[in-house]
Image (spheres, rainbow, N blue to C red):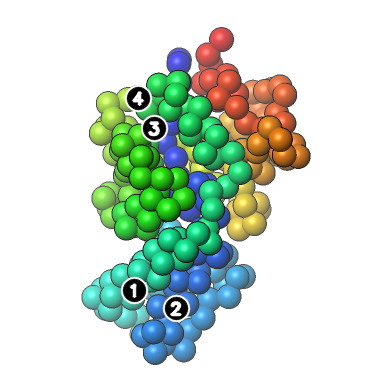
Amino acid sequence: MALKCMLWDVDGTLADTERDGHRVAFNLAFKEAGLQREWDVPTYGELLAVTGGKERIRFDHARRGEPVPSDEEIARLHAAKTAHYQRLISSGRIPLRPGVRRLLEEAWRAGITLGVATTTTPAALEALIEHALGKEWFDRFAVLAAGDIVPAKKPAPDIYTYAMAKLGVSARETLAMEDSGNGWKAAAAAGLRCVVTINDYTRDHDFSGADLVVSELGEPDAPPIHVFANPHGLEDLHHVRLAHLRAIMGEA
């Protein structure tokens, strides 16, 4: 089946947003609200097992044995966090991961339908697109499926099935780009083939069955990427190219 569509996760996939973006923004929101709470790097790594920012706030209170804030209080905290995150993005502190722009542009020029399937909020997604990719990408992405648009977040497949339905494409012609175990599980549950670019928070996740697991997408003029799983036997993996993605989908 030909590669017709690529659906991209955002946090950790398009950019390393978790450690130096979302985590920092959460802590700024906590401080602003007068809460004696700070998520250090290891703590936030543990909380990433819970998908969704509001869900992480709720989970962290519960596991500490503290009263869980109301939905309204959590929503206010999360809105403040999103505002701080947007300011971090607009300052240019969170660039795209290596190879992301190159591969996106190569796929767009080839006429492949591009979309986003993420649990991050629409506001955070829009800030990243505007300041890291460029405003023209609002038109180049055919769907921006984000946040609470579906009731069940990753590892449930809902965000992927929603995006494919919006685009009118099937799982057989769609490739997912992910970075985490929950993301890979969501893609697999939706019947998608999946390329995984790990990061510091996800390197120990279980990606058994993924179609390619690499350290990053890489660049032709940079050192070669690290390849952790290559079940399709792809050759010349100095960096990930569109030809590799076509081969994963079974194109000759």
Name the residue that disc number 3 marks: 114
Q: Earlier in the sequence, mark 3 or mark 1?
A: 1
Name the residue that disc number 2 marks: 28
Q: Is residue 202 above or below residue 55?
A: above
- Amino acid type at circle 1 is Ala
Residue 108 x/y as whole percent: 43, 28
Any part of residue 11 in sight: yes
- Amino acid type at circle 2 is Leu
Write down the quadrant of residue 142 in the picture. Answer: top left
Give the camera-side residue of 247 and 114. Answer: 114
Residue 58 x/y as whole percent: 38, 73
Residue 93 x/y as whole percent: 53, 62
Q: Which mark is residue 80?
A: 1
Q: Which mark is residue 251?
A: none
Q: Residues within 10 Å of mark 4 (few under 14, many from 20)?
A: some
Q: Is residue 237 above or below residue 135?
A: above
Left/right placement of residue 25 relative to residue 238 reads left
Left/right placement of residue 148 relative to residue 130 reads left
Q: Are marks 1 and 2 in contact (CB under 8 Å)?
A: yes
Quarter of the image with the N terminus in it: top left
Q: Are marks 3 and 1 in contact (CB under 8 Å)?
A: no
Q: Residue at x 47, y 63 (%)?
A: 91
Q: Residues within 10 Å of mark 2 (few under 14, many from 20)?
A: some
Q: Which mark is residue 170?
A: 4
Real-space Cα separation, disc 1 to disc 4, in angstroms = 37 Å
Q: Earlier in the sequence, mark 1 or mark 2?
A: 2
- Circle nearer the viewer, 1 or 4: 1
Q: Earlier in the sequence, mark 2 or mark 4?
A: 2
Q: Secondary structure at mark 3?
A: strand
Q: Residues within 10 Å of mark 1 (few under 14, many from 20)?
A: some
Q: Earlier in the sequence, mark 2 or mark 3?
A: 2
Q: Is residue 67 above or below residue 119?
A: below
